[in-house]
Image (cartoon, rainbow, N blue to C red):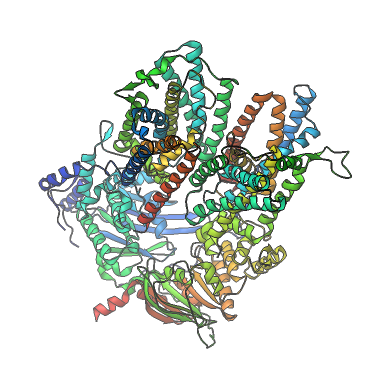
């Protein structure tokens, strides 16, 4: 076997510079893009109104909160965790922000700060219990789901919050909420997604999440700060929940009721899993999550547009999740039998 | 022996070791890379190591051999920092060293590669190697530098540089192991410990491994190589240290010894305890294997076991011997050949099916495959034959379960106040008796025993042997897969040796340990070569 | 070449083997250990604490209604479905390999609608309609079982997906309308309280459902787990499914049955709840946060280990009673909506506490009994 000298290595090295790690888009994501494209085409054929700005813009606005939480959830699930309390956390962030908007007339930046801050604190609660408590994340977040809901309902009183000023219209449905037709919330989400994508692919911290999901004990032995990373994942998710609450308040009317965030955790988890992130940890991507959220929302919007009962969309989402998990299992089995 | 001086254009990774080698040649003084003296270690009352000395020279491959339980793995654990020695000193490059943790060992330059590669499947080879100490440029990982280093490292080891950016999960087990070695070396290792590296490799892959090892020693790295495959050692090792019963017996240059002589050292040249003379009744075999094969694991295995006979199946790790047992029991169906039970050709597809055919098996790995830890003894005994201990196959007959458990507890001399004690709290020997009892609820026609006394104390061992003999007397055909040679010779009527997935020798009850060990380790090839 | 003389062939003496490790700790730590590992003891203590506390509050006039034995007995109406679903989760969680069933509430909803169609719209007799509901539940559970046990899908995400699917089917199947024909409304009597014969005037009336649903189910599940071969197999696969395989236990088959039994129990709950609400509601098991959450909470509180292989009917029953009576008390302590919200908080806090406790006792003592 030959050994190359230093000089000869330069040419091979420069080839390597171009391929840092696996290609930025995976097979599953291409399939997702294709499925979304096909669905859009089918829907357009069924209801020609579908591919107009009037339909696509609301769709993107609806996607934004789910996808943005999904970014954090991707981190959580890659490191083999889960968080079912995000819906309830969104309620807390939403109600506090809404009430401050109504009662104290706070500004947009302050509202952002409040929402994101509260979300981060709630996320930290989860993170601490999970990282240090040695109890499985599903149980902890089941518990905090209830606790957060209690807190949220308490703050709501038994009423709705009325008279929310248009402070947040930058993220809203109307003209001020768009640039070149693209909703700001969606754009901001895409920006954050890009940052997260970069983080997961290019920084040591990001790569460590994959190690933790693969084998957290081996990761610990290798010098990865497992508990810190896990805590961070839940805090980030919480912060993004706060942002999602802002998006949700902005896209709604001047009234906020207690249904905010309700059941959203399922949509988020479905988006992440459909996007190709393995529920068992160790593999996943933010791009997949965004596509997954697009798919879930396409199904939801599409079902209503065609005129089918809206609840049917849940059925389809469930089926898509099963297919995605099945595909992931097949992939793992193929690798194991190598 | 020739000591190769490191070439000038050598990578950073080996520079320190290389400089060490050059230094040695110039001063001429022999400074061992590593030396252990008077090391001992006990776990409770069990002395895993009584007295161990080891001197490893730089740029050499130092083999460490010994039977199971001789203390090799404990010695390695001490060096790698996983456990601390009770007594004795360790010197590194002539200076006293304290190794109290794995980080200490790595900091010192001692890297260990275990059998199972501990890598992260989704990350690339380069990422795995640099995990926890990534090269950065600002907040990002400096892929160019990292990959370049890894490519260099791989090329120096004679491995394919392209794998640097591939996810580890996509690589074969052998390649993953090579990556483990690269990872161990990436931290300026000066001593590399390889624990049974060839067990999972094919012949071609072993060649590559040896190439890598030669390059390493060429750069001055000291390699400690643990293996049961004595024939291999002659291809790669410079010196060999034999351990027996917790002590290092001696160190010799490899060319001074033959496989047989090493075997003699491992065993001690003493005759084993007297073997019981047994009469095996004549008759048709209960179990016959005809050219049985499982692709990649074993091939062309033929044997037969008569009722009342105890046939031993002896093979080293990776010889395929445990896979043969698995196939008979239906865990992995055969891809070639036939299994015949009581005259009928059968094809067991699951343990359940095997049981219906009258085949029982005592699993090799008690904790993983045999024990239901927090369940009581009675549960552990009855779980193998729930239908037998029930009414109408559905309703548990707890009275019978209790009676049967008590009877078996008495018969196997299980030390316990009653049958409701959870098995998890029991010592190895007792737990093993309980798992064995499970197979005896209904006396099987064929009983396959996989490592029946592994991790079992001497007293329990005797008792288990007694039970096995009794079973044979009662008419069971016993096939015993074991890597405990004295045990095999003690109670087996015939002993078949498996190597490289096929039966290479058969011995009668009068064989000596040395003969068998030599056959298993490849002395036959040696003898053939010397003809 | 000479070989070094052999070491004398003695092996180190081991300590006398009395069968297992044995250390005798102090009395106080033994008592703590007993309370922590015997989950029933802890639950009884907690229940007594709750009863005393609530009764004291009642006596002091802080409650909006009397917290007496009549009230406690009447509140058992809610204990019936909760206990049954918690037993369903017990079966699934004990089966191991991350077993859990998040879809149990949705199975209740969908099976309830099926029962509503059968008994209400198609006018089948009750003796046919009830087995029909049970059969539907079994089928829905079997879908979970096949995916998790045969195809080896992770239980969490799978039952999350089937939750979605079943929930939407229940809503869509009758255009979100509940079914409440006169026959169904008559079923309400199934859940009313009755006076126990003979000793009835000395003790409060007990809801009929306790006798017609709860007790038979509790007894049946207990017998299944403790007295049948199936129960042994279930504990075997939950404790160590590799060893179970090597012992000849049919792992996949046993596991599928656990999910099927869970579906069966959900079907029975659906029948009961149809009677309780006098209508077959499409959101019976999925309104609010759904019934899976309290069911799992009660199971975990009752000592079921989330990793499998450990769990007892007695623990689950006691935990259900504790939660029921605690919730009943909270309703009296806080009016209306506040009360429901505090129940939520209590449930969440209890779950986290119980899980932390289970984890601690498993690490320190090797599990609860």
Q: Nearer the viewer, residue A279 or B3?
A: A279
Q: Nearer the viewer, residue B363 or B103?
A: B363
Quadrant location of residue A187? top left
Q: Residue A156 at what x, y percent from top left?
A: 56, 21
Say whether residue C24 is left or right of residue A206: right
Quadrant location of residue C46? top right
Q: Residue B197 at what x, y percent from top left?
A: 33, 60
Q: Residue B274 at what x, y percent from top left?
A: 50, 79
Report the residue at 34% width, 35% height from top.
A205
Q: Is residue C5 visible?
A: no
Residue at the left extreme?
A7
Q: Nearer the viewer, residue B306 or B433?
A: B306
Q: Is residue A275 visible?
A: yes
**Figure label count:** 0
Q: Nearer the viewer, residue C265 or B291?
A: C265
Residue at the top extreme?
A104
Say whether residue C279 is left or right of residue B530: right
Q: Is residue C265 above or below residue B496?
A: above
Say whether residue B523 is left or right of residue C310: left
The quarter in which the C terminus of chain B is drawn is bottom left
Report the residue at 54% width, 87% height from top.
B281
The quarter in which the N terminus of chain B is drawn is bottom left
Quadrant location of residue C41? top right
């Amino acid at each position: 076997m030959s050994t190359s000298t230093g000089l000869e290595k330069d040419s091979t090295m420069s080839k390597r510079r171009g391929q840092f790690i696996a290609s930025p888009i995976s097979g599953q994501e291409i399939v997702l893009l294709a499925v979304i494209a096909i669905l859009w085409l089918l829907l357009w054929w069924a209801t020609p109104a579908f591919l107009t700005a009037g339909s696509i813009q609301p769709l993107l606005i609806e996607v934004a909160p789910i996808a943005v939480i999904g970014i954090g959830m991707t981190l959580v699930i890659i490191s083999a965790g889960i968080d079912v309390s995000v819906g309830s956390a969104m309620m807390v962030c939403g109600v506090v922000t809404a009430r401050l908007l109504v009662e104290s007339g706070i500004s947009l930046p302050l509202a952002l700060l409040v929402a994101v801050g509260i979300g981060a604190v709630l996320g930290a609660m989860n993170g601490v219990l999970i990282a240090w408590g040695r109890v499985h994340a599903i149980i902890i977040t089941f518990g905090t789901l209830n606790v957060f809901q209690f807190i949220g309902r308490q703050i709501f009183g038994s009423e709705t919050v009325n008279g929310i000023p248009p402070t947040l219209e930058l993220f809203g449905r109307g003209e001020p909420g768009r640039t070149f037709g693209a909703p700001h919330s969606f754009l901001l989400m895409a920006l954050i997604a890009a940052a997260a994508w970069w983080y997961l692919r290019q920084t040591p911290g990001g790569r460590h999440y994959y190690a933790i999901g693969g084998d957290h004990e081996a990761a610990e032995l290798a010098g990865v700060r497992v508990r810190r990373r896990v805590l961070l994942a839940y805090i980030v998710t919480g912060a993004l929940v706060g942002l999602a609450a802002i998006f949700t308040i902005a896209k709604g009317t001047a009234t906020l009721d207690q249904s905010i965030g309700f059941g959203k955790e399922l949509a988020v988890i479905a988006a992440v899993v459909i996007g190709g992130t393995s529920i068992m940890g160790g593999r996943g991507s933010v791009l997949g999550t965004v596509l997954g959220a697009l798919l879930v929302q396409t199904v939801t919007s599409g079902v209503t547009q065609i005129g089918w009962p809206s609840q049917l969309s849940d059925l389809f989402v469930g089926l898509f999740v099963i297919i995605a998990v099945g595909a992931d299992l097949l992939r793992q089995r193929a690798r194991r039998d190598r | 022996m020739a000591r190769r001086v490191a070439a000038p254009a050598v990578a950073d990774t080996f520079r320190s070791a290389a400089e060490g080698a050059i230094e040695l040649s110039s001063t001429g003084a022999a400074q061992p890379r590593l030396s252990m003296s008077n090391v001992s270690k006990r776990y409770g009352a069990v002395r895993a190591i009584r007295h161990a000395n080891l001197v490893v020279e730089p740029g050499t491959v130092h083999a460490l051999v010994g039977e199971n339980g001789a203390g090799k793995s404990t010695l390695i654990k001490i060096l790698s920092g996983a456990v601390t020695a009770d007594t004795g000193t360790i010197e590194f490059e002539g200076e006293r060293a304290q190794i109290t943790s794995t980080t200490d060992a790595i900091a010192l330059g001692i890297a260990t590669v275990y059998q199972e590669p501990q890598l992260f499947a989704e990350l690339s080879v380069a990422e795995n190697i640099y995990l926890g100490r990534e090269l950065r440029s600002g907040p990002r990982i400096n892929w160019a530098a990292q990959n370049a280093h890894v490519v260099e490292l791989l090329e120096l080891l004679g491995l394919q540089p392209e794998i640097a950016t591939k996810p580890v999960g996509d690589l074969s087990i052998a390649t993953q192991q090579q990556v483990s070695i690269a990872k161990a070396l990436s931290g300026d290792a000066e001593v590399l410990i390889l624990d049974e590296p060839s067990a999972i490799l094919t012949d071609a892959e072993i060649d590559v491994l040896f190439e890598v090892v030669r390059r390493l020693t060429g750069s001055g790295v000291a390699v400690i190589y643990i293996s049961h495959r004595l024939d291999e050692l002659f291809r790669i090792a410079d010196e060999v240290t034999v351990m027996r019963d917790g002590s290092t017996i001696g160190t010799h240059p490899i060319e001074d010894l033959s496989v047989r002589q090493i075997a003699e050292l491992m065993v001690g040249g003493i005759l084993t305890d007297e073997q019981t003379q047994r009469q095996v009744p004549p008759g048709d075999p209960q179990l016959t294997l005809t050219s049985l094969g499982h692709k990649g694991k074993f091939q062309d295995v033929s044997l037969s076991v008569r009722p009342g006979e105890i046939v031993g199946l002896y093979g080293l790790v990776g010889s395929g011997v445990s896979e043969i047992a698995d196939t008979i029991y239906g865990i992995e169906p055969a891809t070639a050949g036939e299994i015949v039970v009581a005259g009928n050709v059968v094809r067991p597809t699951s343990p359940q099916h095997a049981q219906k055919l009258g085949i029982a098996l005592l699993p090799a790995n008690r904790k993983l495959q045999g024990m239901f830890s927090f369940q009581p003894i009675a549960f552990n005994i009855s779980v193998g034959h729930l239908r037998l201990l029930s009414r109408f196959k559905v309703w548990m007959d707890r009275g019978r379960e209790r009676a049967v458990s008590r009877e078996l507890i008495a018969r196997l001399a299980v030390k316990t106040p009653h049958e409701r004690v959870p098995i998890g709290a029991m010592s190895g020997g007792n737990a093993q008796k309980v798992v064995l009892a499970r197979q005896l609820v209904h006396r099987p026609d064929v009983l396959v025993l996989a490592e029946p006394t592994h991790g079992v104390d001497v007293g329990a061992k005797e008792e288990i042997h007694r039970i096995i003999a009794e079973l044979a007397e009662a008419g069971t055909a016993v096939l015993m897969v074991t890597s405990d040679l004295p045990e095999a010779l003690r109670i087996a009527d015939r002993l078949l040796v498996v190597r490289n997935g096929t039966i290479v020798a058969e011995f009668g009850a009068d064989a000596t340990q040395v003969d068998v060990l030599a056959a298993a380790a490849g002395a036959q090839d040696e003898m053939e070569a010397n003809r | 070449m000479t070989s070094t003389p052999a070491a004398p062939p003695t092996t180190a003496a081991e300590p006398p083997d009395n069968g297992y490790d044995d250390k005798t700790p102090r009395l106080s730590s033994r008592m703590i250990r007993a309370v922590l590992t015997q989950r029933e003891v802890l639950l009884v203590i907690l229940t007594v604490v709750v009863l005393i506390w609530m009764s004291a509050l009642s006596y002091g006039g802080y409650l909006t209604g009397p917290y007496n034995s009549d009230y406690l007995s009447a509140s058992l109406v809610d204990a019936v479905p909760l206990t049954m679903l918690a037993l369903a989760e017990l079966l699934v969680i004990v089966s191991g390999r991350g077993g859990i069933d998040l879809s149990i509430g949705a199975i209740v909803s969908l099976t309830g609608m099926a029962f509503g169609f059968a008994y209400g719209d198609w006018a089948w007799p009750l003796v046919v309609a009830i087995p029909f509901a049970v059969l539907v539940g079994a089928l829905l559970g079997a879908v979970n079982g096949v995916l998790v046990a045969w195809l080896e899908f992770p239980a969490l995400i799978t039952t999350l997906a089937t939750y979605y699917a079943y929930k939407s089917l229940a809503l869509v199947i009758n255009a979100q309308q509940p079914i409440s024909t006169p026959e169904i409304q008559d079923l309400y009597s199934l859940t009313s309280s009755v006076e126990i014969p003979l000793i009835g005037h000395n003790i409060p009336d007990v809801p009929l459902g306790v006798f017609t649903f709860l007790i038979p189910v509790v007894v049946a599940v207990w017998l299944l787990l403790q007295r049948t071969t199936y129960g042994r197999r279930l504990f075997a696969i939950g404790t160590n499914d590799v060893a179970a395989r090597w012992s000849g236990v049919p792992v996949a088959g046993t596991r599928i049955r656990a999910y099927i039994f869970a579906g069966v129990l959900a079907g029975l709950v659906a029948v009961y709840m149809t009677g309780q609400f006098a209508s077959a509601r499409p959101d019976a098991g999925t309104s609010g946060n759904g019934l899976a959450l309290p069911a799992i909470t009660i199971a975990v509180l009752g000592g079921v280990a989330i990793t499998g292989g450990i769990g007892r009917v007695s623990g689950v029953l006691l935990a259900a009673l504790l939660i029921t009576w605690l919730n009943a008390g909270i309703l009296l302590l806080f009016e209306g909506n506040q009360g429901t919200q505090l129940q939520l908080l209590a449930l969440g806090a209890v779950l986290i506490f119980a899980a932390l406790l289970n984890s601690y006792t498993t690490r320190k003592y090797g599990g609860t009994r």
